[in-house]
Image (tube, rainbow, N blue to C red):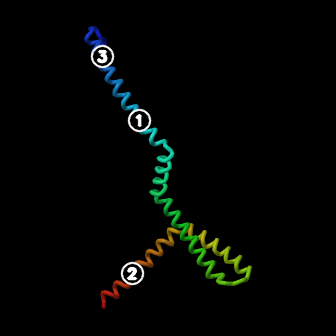
Amino acid sequence: MQNITTVTGLKDAIKALETEQIEKGRLLKEELVITYESLKPVNILTNTLKELFTTSHLMENISGTTLGMVTGYLIKKLFIRESPSKIRVILGSVFQLGISKLIAQKAEYIRAIGQVVFQHLFSKSEHKHRKQ
């Protein structure tokens, strides 16, 4: 800041500082409102859920786990059928757990293999329709 030597210079400097203070106060109030809104529990929950469901890694994990659980359940039902044997029920549960865990861990590979199989099946059916 320059040295002020006149009364008008002093008044101008005071006026400039007052204007600066008013502008900084306005910006501070805006930031306070934004912070207040973002800290409301509803907004925290909403933002967390948005982040949670837009994260592709999480969705891949959920889909892999779901695929594993469904496959394990189906394998168990096929293995046990309607058998009253306790040993078969126990083995079916162990088998279900193992298959579910394996598929959940290797979901990316299984998904890739599934895509290749579907592409292969659909490309063959398209070729048959084109030939006819």
Quadrant location of residue 15?
top left
Q: CA distance from mark 1 to mark 3?
A: 27 Å
Q: Residue at x 40, y 78 (%)?
A: 119
Above or below residue 2? Residue 57 is below
Residue wearing tag 1? 31
Side (left or right) of 129 relative to 44 = left
Label 3: how many residues lie within 10 Å, few (<14), some (14-19) or many (20+)? some
> Most extreme residue toward the bottom, as rendered?
132
What kind of residue is marked 2? Phe
Label 3 near label 1: C-beta < 8 Å? no
Quadrant location of residue 116?
bottom left
Side (left or right) of 125 relative to 102 = left
Pointer 2 or 1: first along the chain? 1
Label 1 near label 2: C-beta < 8 Å? no
> Most extreme residue toward the right, as rendered?
86
Q: CA distance from mark 3 to mark 2?
A: 78 Å
| Closer-to-camera residue (106/93) | 93
Instruction: Report how many numbered discs are placed on residues in the image.
Output: 3
| Closer-to-camera residue (38/103) | 38
Q: CA distance from mark 2 to mark 1?
A: 56 Å
Q: Position of residue 131 (x, y in %)?
A: 30, 89
Q: Position of residue 1 (x, y in %)?
A: 32, 17
Residue wearing tag 3? 13
